[in-house]
Image (spheres, rainbow, N blue to C red):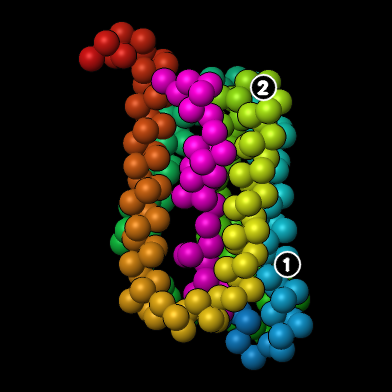
Amino acid sequence: MVTKAQLTFQHFFLGIFAVANNFPALGPFLNICDGLNRREQLRLCYIATLTAFLVMLVALVIGRGLLDFLGISIPAFRIAGGLLLCTSGVSMLNSKAETDSPHSKSDYSQVISQAVIPVAIPLTTGAGTFSTIVIFAQEVNGNWFQFSLLLASIIAATIIIYVMFKYSTNLLKVLGRIGMNVLIKIVGLFTLSLGVQFIILGITAAFPAFSNF
């Protein structure tokens, strides 16, 4: 069980960044930026980053209300979110930093749409991100100081996402394809671990008898 004392900026930030990072999206992003001038590339960077931020903000503001409306309990959502994170983590552990994308770049409007889907959603922020933030918001449970820490964590993650998109070409040159693959797998391991933790907490909340084991 997570205590109030454990709900720190580090707790929120590490959890969010594990599921809201753009390492898997850098390859497709570089591909759609190919042939564009710097101004057009920066515009795609802004669009992808803003979309990712809005996904996280929606999860923070209305995520719990949406669950209540649908009649979904937090333990059930925690278990489902944990399964999603486990799937995402395993996928990252088995993935490669591809620089090719199946999408064509026939016109700039299509390139913009690709910056939203799949670059921002789901490669940067997806169902795992949404569920993680909703669960964190539930843990905060009306404490405005901790809510501000959670919001600050989302903003910090967004800034890192923006910087990585903006300097993605330089990052790929520094790390190389092998380095990017290693980085993706490390983040995938943290994501998988977070998913397992969510499942454990969800099961113990739904079935208190298991907490004695």
Determine whether 11 is above or below 104 in the image.
above
Instruction: Mark yes or no: residue 200 visible.
Output: yes
Asked if the magenta segment contains residue 4, the reply would be: yes
The percent position of residue 111, horizontal first and vertical second, equals: 68, 76
Quadrant assignment, res 85:
top left
Numbered circle sitting on residue 46: 1
Q: Position of residue 197 (x, y in %)?
A: 37, 33
- The front one of 206 and 192 is 192
Q: Please name the residue shown 72% across and 76% down the image.
A: 42
| Residue drawn where x is 73% and y is 65% of the image | 47
Say above or below: 70 vs 109: above
* Distance Cα–Cα, label 1 vs label 2: 31 Å
Q: Which residues are magenta?
A: 1-30
Q: Quadrant of the N terminus?
A: top left
Residue 155, labelled with which disc? none
Which residue is denoted by mark 2 in the rendering?
A: 143
User: Going 56% across and 24% down the picture, which residue do you hit?
Assistant: 139
Q: Earlier in the sequence, mark 1 or mark 2?
A: 1
Q: Is residue 10 magenta?
A: yes
- SS class of the residue under badge 2? loop
How crowded pointer 1 is (Cα within 10 Å; few <14, some 14-19, many 20+) is rated as some
Q: Quadrant of residue 68?
A: top right
Q: Answer left or right for 132 relative to 210.
A: right
> Residue, x 67% and y 40% (percent of image)?
151
Circle 1 or circle 2, nearest the eye: 2
Q: Crowding near pointer 2: few (<14 within 10 Å), some, many (20+)?
A: few
Q: Secondary structure at mark 1?
A: helix
